[in-house]
Amino acid sequence: METQVLIIGGGATGTALARDLALRGVDCILVEAEDINAGASGRNHGLLHSGARYVSNDHEAAVECRTEGEILKRVASRSIQDTGGYFVAVQGDDEKYVADFPGYCAASGIQAKAIDVAVAREREPALSPNTIAVYEVPDASVDPFRLSLESIAQARSLGARLMRRTKVVGFEREGTRIRAARVRDAVTGVEQRIEVGQVVNAAGAWAREVALLAGAPVEMLYSAGTLLITHGRMAYHVINRLRKPGNADILMPGGTVSVLGTTSRRVDSLADVHPTVAEVDLIIAEASPMLPALETMRFIRAYAGVRPLLGSPAGSDGRNVSRGFALFDHEDQGLTNFATLTGGKLTTCRLMAERAADLVCRRLGVTRPCLTALEVIPPAPECEWTVPGHAPREWMRAHGLDDPMLCECEMVSGSVVDLLYASLRAAGDMPTLTDIGLRSRVGKGACQGAFCAIRTAAHLYQRGDFQARRGLDEIADFFRERWRGQHAVLWGEQLAQAELMEALNCGLFGEELRGVAGFDTLRPAAPGEGTP
Amino acid sequence: MSATFLRMALLVSLGLCALGILWRVSTWFRVRIGPDARTIPLHRRLSAAVGGAFAALFSRRTPGILKAFVLDVLLQRRLFADSKVRWLGHLFILAGFLLLLVMHGLAKLVTLKVFPAYQATLDPFLFLRNLFGAVTVLGVMMVMGARRHRPASSPIVRRPGDRIFTALLALVLVSGFLLEAQKVASPRAFYRMTKEYLDTTDPEETLPLRTVWAAEYGVAFPDLQGTPDPDKLAEGRELHNDACASCHTRPTSAFVSYPISRAMAPVVETLDEADAERWLNYLHVFACFLGLILLPFTRFFHALADPVSLLANGAASTGPLSPAARATRRALATDACVGCSLCDDRCSVAPIARHLGNPALLPSHKLLATRDLALHPHSLDRVDAHARRVAEGAWLCTTCGRCTERCPVGLDLADMWDAGKGDLAHAGHPAPAQWVQERTALEWADSLGASPGALDVLRDAASPLSAHRETYSACVQCQTCTNVCPVVAHGGEEPGAIDLTPQKVMNLLRLGMVDLALGSRMVWNCATCYQCQEHCPEGIRVTDVMLELRGMAYRSLGQSRERRQPE
Amino acid sequence: MTQTQTEPKVWDVAVVGAGMAGMATALFAAEQGLSVLQIGNGGGLLFASGLLDLLAVHPIASRRLWGSPFDALAAIRRDQPDHPLARVDDATMRAAYESFTSALGAAGLAYAPLDDRNHLVLTSLGTAKPTYGVPRTMAAGVAAMAERVPCLLLDFRGLREFSARQIVATVGDTWPGLRSARIEFPGAEASSELYAAHLARALESHETRDKTIALVKPLLGDARAVGFPAVLGLGCSGVVHAAFQAALGVPVFEIPTMPTSVPGLRLMDALEHAVVARGVHRLLRGNVTSAAFDDTAVLSLGGVPGGETVSARAVVLATGRFTGRGLVAGQQRITEPVLGLPVQQPASRETWHSRDFLDPAGHEVNRAGLRTDSVFRPFDATGRPAWPGLFAVGSILAGQDWMREKCGAGIALGTARVAVDQIVRQLGAR
């Protein structure tokens, strides 16, 4: 195989870069070790920053967010809900900051309109009675999955290639150039070689590892952030705490749920980053003064993403480190066709891609201009199912006789699963339950897969898509993936839900016993003996 | 006031009352409630009623009917179970007023026959009259006090005559007490008696007697204030015993009027001069007459209609009623309703009536609306706010039957609502379950989305259950609600009969997509059997939410429909 | 109303809860001639599978499956003396299962004869559930699977959680003669989704049954047994099952499904029938709001019109765990909401759950619960029985993991039996 540009990492930046290059007519392959947005791109608030969050400590980032937010609202409008945002201060918050806030915003060109507290509380009844000030800003919510999926879909329609579950395991270097990359299929283990013109390392938190493989180390820090998902939607606007950036200061309306976060914890290793009980409790305790209902809220899930950060004041928790992005050309390390694109935030992913694409094109001698800020991303039927509430509406529209609901919590029907399965198959993939979960709302509701994973597996078995014990393996994988985010929020009603899940899947189906000899072969032990 | 005049007036008012009653009774056969009643001629209804009454009276059911009359109508056992205060108040009014009427109002006809020694001014009659009056007043106060605790959203239903009648009743009681007080304290009344029995009105000559009456009988002689002269008192007592004592008990036993008379003492002469006694007497008597005339047009007419209604029930219990008899029973029921509002308190849709701020959902109000529509079939032709409220009231009924179960006078309200719905449909207000099917749930949702403000009614509703996150937060998605739902169980025979299951309706609401649920078949086909709610292991109020949705849907979808199809 | 007059002023036993353990307690106590009041509805049984497991896995960390539940019991007595099952001797356990299944049999829900073995029952997922008591409608499946006879597994289009094809795909390699087929459920051709309880009720009509059988017959082929999802009748499953067997001419068996499952509903109905037939007085809507213990226990009830108090000489708490609200987990601590009894639990939420859902060692939170003495009298804060007549039975007890040990029914029946025996002794001694 060969390609003009190899992009490593299928997050928001990698997919945006693939789209950018494809629009400029540059051939590229995107390799992704897991799946689209499997890293931090899929584990964030889904906030399209107006920039107001950064007005006090990072003017440049604030302005960048403002302009990029406006562009994305234009070109990716289907992925964005223009909810508007509130900045809310409650009694005890720093009043000086509250007073300075409108000035900061004005300085960054961000509209911040003071709202009467009573009016704000009428629009957002979840706000505390102790609210003292509210400003409205043009924040919006963005569905990062839809954004990335549609970006890569457009890129592929223009000839770009995507290789999921494909990990870069090495580079062939020739002088100052990388000649080829060796990649391994994570499922089959088969390795192959891709001859490359240029390489862009957009592996997010894993960019350090990739750069090391190329022999061009970069300094990076990791900051893990945990977020919580509520059982029902708490608010209609993005609710920001009106104070200096800190823990648990944003509540996002995520369609049918709300997302609350985040924390910032320095981690040294990327292995097994998961939300902790302490973080969950901290988030609730920190945000409750602004949103008192959180104290009795049912949470269905938590998740943790790792932000790659650049530059490091020693001993910092990572929050004071710039959220700006960096594009390393590695030329001082003697490499002329390798670049690392890292840092940044979801809101600026298009701009990051544009900068990287400019570099790559300059190196390739391509002069076509960037079109990503002008061309609207076209819709694709397999990319719209991550949007909460979309599946039930479409199901009711078609309401086919043979379209059973597989996921009741989020109301995803068989036809959606079929469509996603077919689209993945068409691209030559062997789709898993987790793949379908990533591209839809399956498993994202209250039951966290307890019922829907089983129904979806039965559906796919019945269609002949699953063979032998594969469906059972995938149910187990799916549960493991969902559980990572569940165990820290299990109390109250969600613990009752989890208990039911365990009663069903362990108590009755004995899924934890799979692999035990007598169990798998359906040969019971005789009395007087146990099966070790 | 001449006796002849009074008698004439009494006869006239009795006659008018009788005519009123006759007219009201005639409505039992004339008013046509329900489509099936429209074609039945008057004579068929009359003969069915007579036949039914005979069948009931001479059946083995008679003891049962009697028992029901005593327990339900006289003793009000259901009211007793509901509110002891209201029950006692009602009993006080009933007993106090009836006894006053018999002992006092009909003294010549009844009391004198039974107690030939009856004198209005003698104990125990003097005491009893006050007692009965006081009991009546107390009863009224208790009932009104109990009513003040009613929420504004479920007011007591009233006929136009009710307020006037209540005012007249108060007037009768108040004027009666005042009249008695005036008579006690009045020197003029004293002289009238001395003139009649001692043939003198000379103040000096009657001084000893006056001393006694001033000291012991409360007559307010302006010259006899202060401590009485003991000699005159002794002298007077002798005369008193001879001439007065046989007819007069000391008025202190008039424990209401007497204190009033003492309070009136300073002005009693002025009142005498103004001929107060006569005017009060007129007031008292004519208020009674007027009340009598008005009685058939108030809800107190139920006293007469109830026994007949019970008889009709008795007839119904011996076999199925003919359509003619059913029509008559419905008309009768609108009169037999005592307006106690026990039905309203137990009505399944009472919470929705509250949310929507529409008391027309409540049975006692609906009963009158049903009758009104029957009397004026074109009154709802114009689709205005009133017509909408009435139609909403009728169609949001879940036919749970609790009102019928609950009615203290045993009205078959379920049958009444059926009939009323038929009339409404005829008057151009068809069943929502019917017109909701004109579009799919999604089309309804689109139409709501397309009309700004269409969903405002949902937000305006005072804290609806369906809008609360907490309502669904315990759901574990076990689908028990759907598994026990008889509507889903039998919906598989016809394509599209079930668009959403109960679980899906709940999930749509939890997901904030109420617009998709409002026009769904499930919401409107729900049998409101409460199986889902009773079986839910997590105690989620599935049926209550469904009912609430209907209330919201009726209004929001109805508005959307009106916009689309202007009448 | 008339019942109120015959109610004793002081009940011998008040059972709080109507899941498997509550029902077993009420049943056993009534059989002993005690007057029994049962408070609460049968929500917990909605999630039952109909299988009466006893004990199949121990220790869970090494996932050791036991062929005989009584061997496993002996092992648990040796390894975990604080385990609730360690306090139930074999004779008591056998007596509990015998009287429980015979009561169910009398109520129209027959179980296969009990032996000393754990049987494997094929599930809708394609796994096997080890269990002791097997409903008669499922028994033929146990035999068919053990001998690998050629079988036809059927399912109905629209029954979303059940794919016969899935079972064949999953276990077909070890069971060569297994085939699957999908049929339309008669009368539900217009439904995209079917619900087990509705099918079960529909199959109680001759007409639907005959139509179904007519659809199955041509598919029989060489099958020597036929498996269906567990929807063969609700109130009269015995009749429906027998009718299928007679018509098809081969053994017919049911395969348990996801909750809310028909066997669970059957169990609920049969148990309700059984306890009521034995004179148990049930307050379905009531819930205990407070309790005072003196010579007798006085329980205040909410959820009944006007409120009420009842007195009993013994009280048995059978309120279950988190799903049944017998235990309530706050953000930091687990409490017992009815009587406020102390709950044995991990030190902090950090260790409630393992990070792997399918961790063989299980989740620590599942071993939280009430500590009791050897006859299941729960301890108060001082570590002594809270009241001599107060018992706690079933899954609320600490030190067990019924979901992984496959001993849900075992704990319910065994602990109920021990508690009732003790109550009989205590009341007799008075």
Image: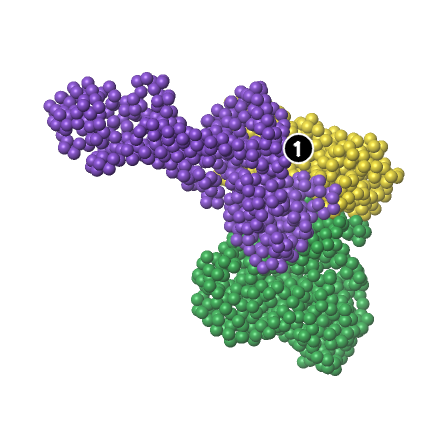
Chain colours: A green, B purple, C yellow
Q: B140 and A365: which one is in front?
A: B140
Q: In this view, does C231 lie above or below A68?
A: above
Q: B443 and B328: which one is in front?
A: B328
SS class, disc 1: helix
Q: Is residue B557 above or below residue A208?
A: above
Q: Residue at x 77, y 60 (%)?
A: A424
Residue located beneath label 1 in the image: C269
Identity of the amino acid at label 1? Asp
- Residue A269 left/right relative to C214: left
Residue C186 point in image, percent of width and height? 78, 40
How would you rate the neighbour count of disc 1 (Cα within 10 Å): few for under 14, some for 14-19, many for 20 or more? Answer: some
Displayed quadrant of residue C147: top right
Read off the chain for label 1.
C
Displayed quadrant of residue A380: bottom right
Q: Residue at x 45, y 58 (%)?
A: A130
Q: Which residue is drawn at 34% across and 32% down?
A: B285
Residue B238 visible in image: yes
**Tag count in the figure?**
1
Residue C308 point in image, percent of width and height? 49, 32
Q: In this view, does B343 lie above or below A341?
A: above
Residue A234 point in image, percent of width and height? 56, 56
Residue B336 visible in image: no
Residue A103 point in image, percent of width and height? 48, 73
Q: Which residue is drawn at 56% across and 60% down?
A: A236
Q: Is residue B353 above or below residue C54?
A: below
- Residue C42 left/right relative to A439: left
